[in-house]
Amino acid sequence: MRLVGQGFKGLVVAPWQTLACVVSLGVAACLIVLSASAGSLTMSMLGRASRAARILVYLKDDVESERIREMIGDISRRPDVASVEYISREEDRTQNADILPEGLVDALPREAIPGQHGLIVIFRDDAGRTSELDGLSSFLEAIEGVDIVAGPPVGSAALRSLAGAVGFVRVTMAVMAAVLLFGTLFFVVGTLTRTMESRREEMAILRLFGATGAYLKAPLYIQACVQGVAGLSGGVLMGLAIISSTNAYLLSELSVGTALPSWPAMSLAAAIPGGIAVGLAGAIIASSRRLP
Amino acid sequence: MSVLSIAGLKKTYPNGNEAIRDISFEVGRGEFVFLSGPSGSGKTTLIRILLKMEESTGGQVLVFGKNLNALLPSAVPYLRRNIGVIFQDFRLLQDRTVFENMALGLNILGLTTREISRRVEGILYDLGIDRYAGAYPAMLSGGEQQRVAIGRALVMEPALILADEPTGNLDWELSQDIVRLFEELNARGTSVLMATHDRFLLEAFPKRTLLINRGILVEDRNPGMAATRREAGQNRFQHFVAGRTDGSPA
């Protein structure tokens, strides 16, 4: 308990430096949380963009299976098409039922829900090629037996561009967080060095009276871990608060449709071992250089 | 068994300075020995070597039968717990009370708060400074501060006390008080090796005296026995006491 008390006392030896250290760690942790969240959002948006790049080609009712196989072969040969899948009437009806309000689906007879057989054409994945996408639509509309070509996914390219921008921000934030964490190590080392300088005389006396290295270092390690855990936990909470307030803006103003994900329990749980690890690293560096 | 056994001790610094050239002696259990010599003769270096604060560059040093040259670094703290150290400049922490200064070493032993209080209060009383338990060192006189420093060593209940010029900053009366205190401790069985260059103290308290000059043990004089001459025909001790020391009654 005395060692723990010494560790906490060490925090106020250089209070401004300790504060700077905790704030830096907090900003780094905040950036990590935001970066992870933005990364997850990017993946989600890319997934949506990928799904949006599908073109649904509805076929006339009288198109025979043989003709459908020929159509699949013709379409698949195009270089901008990744794959073609057949969708039956019943499968289309099921998909349509999924997007209708639940109460309405229950109220309607099954046959009242529209269902038409067709082809799902999956466009080769490459953002920004909207002109090729338009060309594919024209090609599909010209095929004999095609009833309707569901409009090309006009939002896909924009969505993918936005996802790219978010991804860039994510990488930038991750790099900044890494640099900040590394830089913060020097703050941790600096505050611990100040603590050791202030305790130099005491430590020298304690050594003469038989204090072991572990006894002398323990308060420093405790101080470092407290700084690390406080900084990272605070940063995670700050990140979660930013995500929470940003989500309202994303959903209402930008109509992005997907909220920034957050994992409060996991982030906070990770902040504790992370803070301890950063603290220990700083303490090891500081104590290996400065112990009398 | 000897508490200290030193044979052919040498200490040469990297710059070539030979602080100790040849010292051999033994200190038995319960013995009181003065270590004397002029400034720069090697007294402090010897004490630092005995505490394993410095490494010797030759010879053998046994402390409580343990060879310091072969002692693992991890074992050094446990050796030091049996040695009480007292310095000329007291080395008290100015931001701690007398009680806290004395309890400093006891925390290392992992004693309970009650046991620490018991030991510190007992020593404070024995040293006659119990009324200063809550005072800070700056509020005390030099003699009182040295008593606190001695108390800090005594609470550890050491088997050996190494005192490096403990009376160097004290007046004559206080110096005698401190030596009498060491005598009392010695009477209880604690071995004492006290470095001093105060010839009046050496005369006032006739005890075995090791005279070091320029890193060499030049005389091992024991008033209770015939003098042991390290070098035949020499009486460097008298020469040294008469000509080189500056200790004088206040």
Image (spheres, helix red, strand yellow):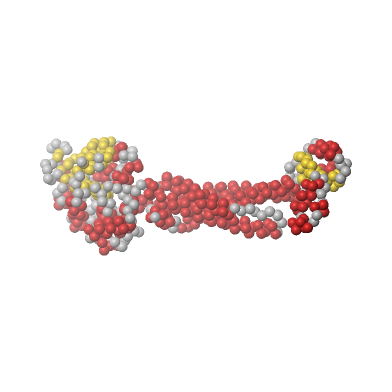
Number of marks: 0
Say which of B83 and B115 sits in front: B115
- Left or right for B221, reference B81: left
Q: Can the viewer see residue A69 in this picture?
A: yes
Q: Position of residue B250 (x, y in %)?
A: 19, 57
Q: Residue B78 at x, y = what percent?
A: 31, 45
- The relative height of residue A251 versus residue B82 in the rendered view (above or below) is below
> For this view, does B146 lie left or right of residue A86?
left
Q: Point out the residue furthest to the bottom here.
A: B131
Quarter of the rendering occupied by the N terminus of chain A:
bottom left
Observer able to see residue B142: no
The image shows residue A222 at horizontal and vertical percentages of 44, 52
A192 to the left or right of A143: left
Q: Is residue A164 left or right of residue B179?
A: right
Residue at the (81%, 49%) spot, across then down: A115
Residue at (66% x, 50% y) in the render: A41
| Viewer-closest of B134 and A66 | A66
In x, y percent, where is residue A214? 39, 47
Q: Nearer the viewer, residue B147 or B249?
A: B147
- Determine the residue positioned at 27% across, 43% down: B50
Q: Residue at x 12, y 43 (%)?
A: B225
